[in-house]
Image: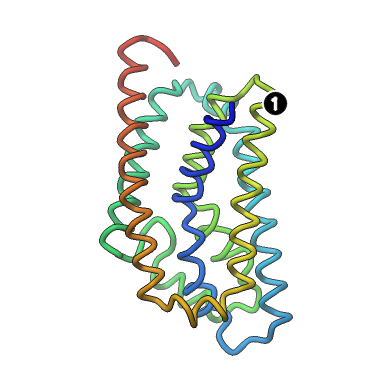
Amino acid sequence: MTEQLLKFFVVFFVVVEPVSLIPVFSGLTEGAGARYRKKMAGKAALIALGICVLFAVAGARFLELMGIALSSFRIAGGSLLFLISLEMVFARTSGTKSTSPEEEESKKREDISVFPLAFPFIAGPGALATILLMAGEVWGKPFLFAGFLLMVTLVMAICWILMLATPRLMKILGVTGANVANRLSGVVLAALAVQFIVDGIRGSFLGSS
């Protein structure tokens, strides 16, 4: 159980990329006061957590209603995560996060907690796909599922802490330091994405869900 939860924590942490929030949050709150930054960071983390919990609780049921086997979703989710990992490794602007027009729009909005922070920067497609993949494996196991939700909450808490500490962290890391951390995380995510695909293919051929 501990090993399974640790695996999920690592995968989810890498997919969410809390470190990448540092330059993003810094740019979106540039010139704002400490009170505003704290409010936006807190709201964004809570809203993202709510989205993730909703997907964890209702995701597996949704797949059943749609007639989608978990093995098929592993292949699709793994493919999506692999594309995200390539963007991380090559330090490209992620199309799965937000587009340039959306980023420009977000700079004009007074409340940036829902968009673009909670979605798509924190609870983005990759994070939600990972939750659906893992939730399907622990569904029906109360203690494991509770631990699973705890890991989600822990990652959201880390995101919140990093956003609060953004001014100090930007002085230490800078944009270059954040990119280096993201590239290293991308390599790990690529390997995990391939494992998802392999497990999905194996499950499909063996006839398991």
Residue 21 versus residue 3 in the image, above or below: below
Q: Write the residue at 38% across / 72% down.
A: 177
Q: Write the residue at 67% across / 41% down.
A: 150
Is disc 1 surrounded by few (<14), some (14 to 19) or many (20+) residues within 10 Å? few
Q: Where is residue 130 in the image (x, y as percent from the top left)?
A: 48, 39
Residue 182 versus residue 199 in the image, above or below: below
Q: 202 and 150: which one is in front?
A: 150
**Under tag 1, what secondary structure?**
helix
**Is 57 positioned to the left or the right of 199 in the image?**
right
**Is 104 positioned to the left or the right of 41 in the image?**
left
Q: Position of residue 10 (x, y in %)?
A: 48, 44
Q: Write the residue at 47% across / 78% down.
A: 172
Q: Write the residue at 65% across / 50% down.
A: 49
Q: 98 and 53: which one is in front?
A: 53
Q: Which residue is outermost to the top?
A: 207
Q: 51 and 199: which one is in front?
A: 199
**Quarter of the picture holding the C terminus:** top left
In the image, what residue type sits under mark 1? Answer: Phe
Give the residue pinned by disc 1. Answer: 143
Residue 13 versus residue 64 in the image, above or below: below
Q: Where is residue 94 in the image (x, y as percent from the top left)?
A: 36, 61
Q: Where is residue 138 in the image (x, y as percent from the top left)?
A: 58, 25
Residue 44 sits in which quadrant? bottom right
